[in-house]
Amino acid sequence: MVWWFRPPSNPFVTVNFAVDATEARVYLAKLATAGIRVTLNHLVAGSIGHTLAQHPYANARVIGQRIVQLPHVGIAMPVNLLDKAGLGRELSMAVVANVDQLTLAELAETTTKTLHAERDGQSKTPLINQMLSVGNALPHTFFKGFLRAVDAAANTPYLGDIAYRHFGVTTALSNVGATLKPIEGVLFRGADVMPPSRLFQVGTFWGSSTVQDEVIAVDGKPTVRPMLPMILLFDHRLIDGVRGSKIIQTFAAALRDPAGTFGDRGQIRIGQAAE
């Protein structure tokens, strides 16, 4: 597979699915009553961390001609900066490392702080800070050359390991449209996404949209349920179709039984169930 999908071929397989968010909504409401602020996006991120901890072969990346399994789950989330005048850029990246070592409540707190820091122009990721500093100091042409050099280094075994220790990303989550309200008469069905092929490739890429009411079969009868549309892209060099379906099943099970997965108060460590 590593040989077959040589760049610039796209090794990613796209799967669109939707998960019943009824129990997730009930769970989040109970946490809010207890004074624990966890959003649906936090719950999705926690379910991804739980899933990759359960299926460590998916928590990997291809470096050169090697498949390297990574010890902890790190999630990168794009941060929109279009409404932040003065920062000089449109996009940033929030990175939450060692997600599997956190509880859901800790993940929510860490993610919220990280997102606020990124939107305030105070990135907490050292590697991103260094790259931004170089980008601000160099002319555009030279900065592109610098990025090419970093990309080449990140795809060598030794320097790739160093880059992971500084960046810690193994997957990515984009909440496309998740902050928008559902539009009556419109259903989101999925998308075909091309993850970035340079710098720090990931084994899986996830996308979520806004919850929308849909008619699904429950006990053989048509029932309206709040459904969360999801996109999963997985690197076919790491994951085949059978394993891809297991990943989706684990993710969906976590979202459909969040109390059993993360604890009544979000107190269970996200990777604990995989041990």
Image: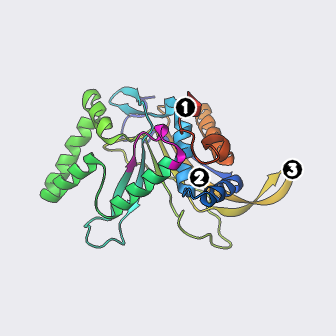
- How far apart marks 2 and 1 lie (CA) works out to 19 Å
Residue 87 position, x and y percent, is 26, 67
Amino acid marked by disc 2: Met
- Most foreground residue, 207 or 21: 21
- Residue at image mark 2: 230
- Residue at image mark 3: 220
- Most foreground residue, 90 or 26: 26
Classify 150 as above or below 113: above
Residue ID at (29%, 39%): 166
Amino acid marked by disc 3: Gly
Colour scheme of the picture: rainbow
Q: Say whether residue 139 is left or right of residue 46.
A: left
- Residue at image mark 1: 55
Residue ID at (58%, 36%): 244
Which is more N-terminal, label 2 or label 3?
Answer: 3
Instruction: Tell me the crowding category of disc 3: few under 14, some 14 to 19, or many 20 or more residues within 10 angstroms, Cα based.
Output: few
Residue 72, picture quadrant: top left
Residue 93 position, x and y percent, is 36, 54
Which is more N-terminal, label 3 or label 1?
Answer: 1
Residue 227 position, x and y percent, is 68, 57
